[in-house]
Structures are given as structure tokens and as C-alpha cells.
Amino acid sequence: MAYLQHLPADLLARAAKVRLAAFDVDGTLTDGRLWYSESGHETKVFHVHDGLGLKRLQAHGVHVAIISARISHPVALRAEELDIAHVYQGQGNKRECLQQILEALNLSPEQAAFVGDDLPDLPAMRISGLAVAVSNAHPWVVEQAHWQTRLAGGQGAAREVCDLILHAQGKSAAEQEHWR
């Protein structure tokens, strides 16, 4: 992944400290569109690359959290499938939720990454050691981010963040060896 080789040293230093990677859902782990069936059931589409990235972060000891303002059964199903223990839906205050997770894990804010796309994500991003905006994020979110992904939410952006963290923590070689 050549694009990871040319990142600024301060960004890599931030990513090297991450022990908790928290993700918004709509617009970050999904493309942000809301899909409803004729019966009113909500469906969501998740990218398989993102899922593997989240699993690999966990395999290397990085906690993964989902913090969403909405409540959605498909999110709970996807989180269960990926063995994500920290799933918080219906969160109107994502900053407070992130702080509670950090306290429970005995981590500092500089050890957290928060990945988002829209205005409700800003408070959590502002306290995180690594704030990431997906490529199609609202401009105000991009302004507050330490880094912006090349890919859009729901299109592999979360995987880029996972790869960045693993690269910054010197775990890319171990990942490559794992898949030989």
C-alpha cells in the first residue's frame, strides 16, 4: 500500500498510539443511504473489506467500537458477526459515549481514533488523538480531521483507517505474513 509510505510523521505518531478505534455507522461504515423495505424494515450495506479490517485490528489488540446516533438491527447483526463488543446505538452525545468507553478501558483520549462523516461526529472527533473523516464527509468534519480517507464511507474507508493504524504500529509485516 504505497499511499501509506508517504504519510506525515505526525499522523503516523497519532495512529501509533491508538488502542481504541471508534466508528460512526451511517455514512462511515455504510454509504449513508437509508434503505427501507415495503414492510418498513431497514436494511444496510456494509463493505466486506471494512469488516476484515476491523477484525484484523482486534486481532492485534486494538479495541473497536461502534457509536451511532440511530438504532438499527442490521448494525447489531454486523457487529455480532465481527465480534465487536463495544456497540452503542441511539447515542445523541457521541463524545460522552466515547469518554465512557475510554474510562471503562482505562485509556486516554489520545489513544482513541474516531472516524466519522457528519456534524454529530465532531464532538467525539475533537477529543480523539486521531480524528478521521471519510472522503465524502461534510466539509466542516474534514476541517477538524487529522486525516481524510481516499475512499468514501461504506466503500472501504474504514479499511483504510485500519490499515493506517496497523502500519503506524509496525504490524503490516505481521499482517502480510499472516496471509502467506
Image (cartoon, rainbow, N blue to C red):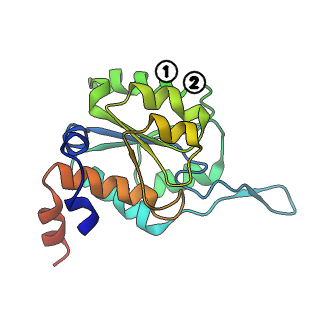
In this picture, residue 155 sits left or right of residue 110 = right
Q: Which mark is residue 108?
A: none
In percent of the image, x 26 and y 43: which residue is there?
11
- Comparing 74 with 128, the one in front is 128
- Comparing 109 with 105, the one in front is 109
Q: Is residue 84 visible?
A: yes
Label tally? 2
- Report the residue that reaches farthest toward the bottom: 180
The residue where tag 1 is placed is: 96
In percent of the image, x 21 and y 39: which residue is there?
10
What quarter of the picture does the C terminus occupy?
A: bottom left
In this picture, residue 66 sits left or right of residue 176 = right
| Inter-mark Cα distance, 1 to 2 | 6 Å
Residue flagged by tag 2: what amino acid is it?
Answer: Asn
- In terms of secondary structure, where does tag 2 sit? loop
Mark 1 touching mark 2, by CB under 8 A?
A: yes
What quarter of the picture does the N terminus occupy?
A: bottom left
